[in-house]
Amino acid sequence: DSGVTQTPKHLITATGQRVTLRCSPRSGDLSVYWYQQSLDQGLQFLIQYYNGEERAKGNILERFSAQQFPDLHSELNLSSLELGDSALYFCASSALASGSTVQFFGPGTRLTVL
Amino acid sequence: TQLLEQSPQFLSIQEGENLTVYCNSSSVFSSLQWYRQEPGEGPVLLVTVVTGGEVKKLKRLTFQFGDARKDSSLHITAAQPGDTGLYLCAGARRSGGYQKVTFGIGTKLQVIP
């Protein structure tokens, strides 16, 4: 158990819909990262927050957005869903924003868009 | 084009065999990490290497960071079925005052009893 929690574990929805994925980082970790993992693309970095502020952006679509709240939990919002958005979405947390960053991953949310 | 190329992408071997997987890049990294991921779970950190030429051992797993800090290898001795999983390398580089981490696509290892 990494200490990072993600809900829900599975999500099945239809094209055009909007969903919210939730992540709680390890106690004391200030950084939260979101990743998308699909079979053909591997683990793709989406976005990072540090202590409530956006720190880095990766391959995140405009239809996707995220935020980190004062209690440090984070939400990833996916809208206008397409079939190709079906993937595993992982959240990771780390103690540092710089230095030798070690990320601890949650169990993931498996999103299926029908 | 992946910043970090992992090879092979798939590997199926018999229990007891040795294997090496590779992680290569044209970029220099300040550190490189190896993770193992089992189906339906998140990646779990195995090791972090920081110094060029560094070798770290974790039981039957040996990790090496290239002298130029552009590549790494993972060698498994006498593979066991429990070693089955997806092995991911991740390189960290400084960007704008913080570290940016990039993952390779992974090597999917199957160890057959």
Image (cartoon, coloured by chain):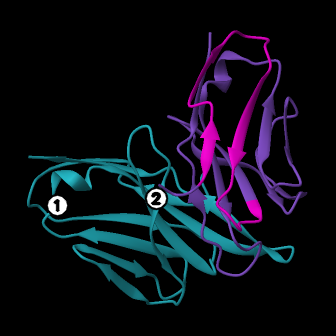
Chain colours: A purple, B cyan
Indicate the secondary structure of the residue bearing disc 2. strand
Q: Which of B74 and A100 is in front in this view?
A: A100
Quadrant of residue A84 within the rendered picture: top right
Q: Nearer the viewer, residue A26 or A41?
A: A26
Q: Which circle marks residue A36 in the picture?
A: none
Q: How crowded is mark 1: few (under 14 residues within 10 Å), some or many (20 or more)?
A: many
Residue bearing the label numbered 1: B79
Q: Which of A64 and B95 is in front in this view?
A: A64
The type of residue carrying mark 1 is: Ala
Residue at x-position 22% and y-position 53%: B82
Indicate the secondary structure of the residue bearing disc 1. loop
Residue bearing the label numbered 2: B44
Q: Is residue B75 left or right of residue A103?
A: left
Residue at x-position 59% and y-position 69%: B91
- Image position, residue A32 (x, y; %): 74, 56
Q: Upstream in the sequence, badge 1 or badge 2?
A: 2
Q: Residues within 10 Å of mark 2 (few under 14, many from 20)?
A: some
- Image position, residue A95 (x, y; %): 69, 71
Q: Give the range drawn in magenta.
A: A4-31
Quadrant of residue A108 within the rendered picture: top right
Q: In this view, does B86 lie to the left or right of A21?
A: left
Q: Judge whether residue A18 is colored magenta.
A: yes
Residue at x-position 38% and y-position 72%: B73
Q: How many labels does the image show?
A: 2
Give me the chain letter of mark 2.
B
Q: How far apart are marks 1 and 2 (CA)?
A: 18 Å
